[in-house]
Image (tube, rainbow, N blue to C red):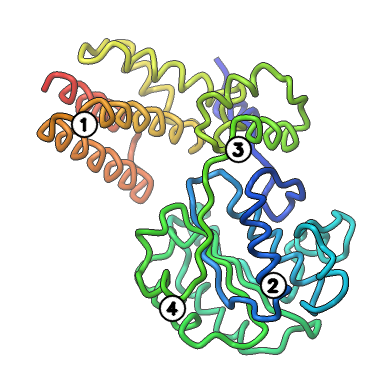
Amino acid sequence: MSSPDTEREVVPEPPHPRQTMDFFGHAEAEQALLENYRSGRAAHAWLIGGPAGIGKATLAYRMARFVLAHRNPGASAVQAAKSLALDAGHPVARRVAAQAHSDLLVLERTIGDTGKMRTEIAVDDVRRTITFFGSTAGEGGWRVCIVDSADELNRFGANALLKILEEPPSNCLLIVVSHAPSRLLPTIRSRCRKLMLRPLAQTEVIQAAAAALGRDVADDELRRASLIAEGSVARCIGLAGGPLADVRERSLALLAQLPAVDARALHAFGDSLERTPDAVFETFLDTARDWLSARIKAETGDLRRLARVAEVWEKLNRAAQEVEVFNLERKPMVFAVFGLLAETVRR
């Protein structure tokens, strides 16, 4: 059996969006950003929404690089541009990839004092926008801030961000990424120009995943993973072999037995998830959510059973959040999840 350290090494991960130069799909969204910028009346804030892993942050960084590289919207290069593409060798692209551009601020979760990734974007980081936007751009152009993602802001962080949106400085661009825009403060949504992205087509998922992993688009693992990736490149990459694919297959095998539960198999499965990378455990949760989604679709004619499935969905998500926030053991949650799902089948 592989050790946890070995498993961590084989979990495939896409390059960070700040390092990603390839872009697949979402041509209309990219053109909307480009047209708005070169109009000379650029929106000061954009909200890019849609499911996780479909390219929202990649598009945000793509826009940021273009604006930082082309300070004048009326310049001939901007007017003639067909896309927001920037060569990987461009000085702006290199500095953004190295997190070394003084006119780009990124708000994202960071490592806390405990040495673990915070579950929220720290409010003190959000307050940095006041100083950042209050100063003059170091290179005489635009100052750009990317929030990735706004779903990870707590109430205080959201209110701090709102203050910037209420009084936007000139030559400043705020790009807010969100997996669930409807859950953001209405006042945040109303002050941003909205750009909603849809899940990618299967061919686009394969192309993007192949580019990220350096594989051929004919790769069988990528093709199989794309079938269940639901338009998400990140999900396809994670499922293209390794422990994520294995845990999904084991989850599906156990789910197929419901309402019966093989206690011995469930004990072994729970033990296997205790010390795995977060991405592996999240794959189990995603598989359970997929199973529930299928139940919701199947129960459309029975409001009572539909309400029950929706209730289980909320309990699952709440339990998952508690495991992450309080660093709880995973095995008890695995048993709790299967207990809830089994009850859903019985009723």
Q: Which residue is mark 4?
A: 162
Residue at horizontal 52%, vertical 70%?
193
Which disc number belongs to residue 300? 1
Percent of width and height locating residue 338: 26, 24
For discs 2 and 4, the disc positioned in front in the rendered view = 2
Q: Disc 3 to disc 2, how far (Cα)?
A: 27 Å
N-terminal label among 3 and 2:
2
Which residue type carries mark 3? Val
Q: Which residue is mark 3?
A: 233
Comes first in the chain, label 2 or label 4: 2
Q: Position of residue 287 (x, y in %)?
A: 40, 28
Question: Label 4, label 1: how many angstroms apart (C-alpha)?
Answer: 38 Å
Classify mark 3: helix, strand or loop: helix
Q: Residues within 10 Å of mark 3 (few under 14, many from 20)?
A: many
Tell me where residue 324 appears, x and y as whole percent.
38, 46
What is the spatial separation of the Cα atoms under label 3 and label 1, in whole angstroms?
A: 29 Å
Distance CA(mark 1)–CA(mark 2): 44 Å
> Label 2 vs label 4: CA separation?
22 Å
Give the mark nearer the N terminus: 3 vs 1: 3
Disc 3 and disc 1 in contact, CB within 8 angstroms:
no
Closer to the camera in the image, 161 or 12: 161
Tag 1: residue type? Thr
Disc 1 residue crowd, few under 14, some 14–19, many 20+, Cα 10 Å: few
Q: Quadrant of the C terminus?
A: top left
> Which of the two discs, 3 and 2, sits closer to the camera?
2
What amino acid type is highlighted by mark number 2? Tyr
Q: Is residue 312 left or right of residue 21?
A: left
Q: Residue at x 70, y 76 (%)?
A: 39
Left or right: 327 as drawn, with respect to 60:
left
The image shows residue 63, relative to residue 283, as above or below, that is: below
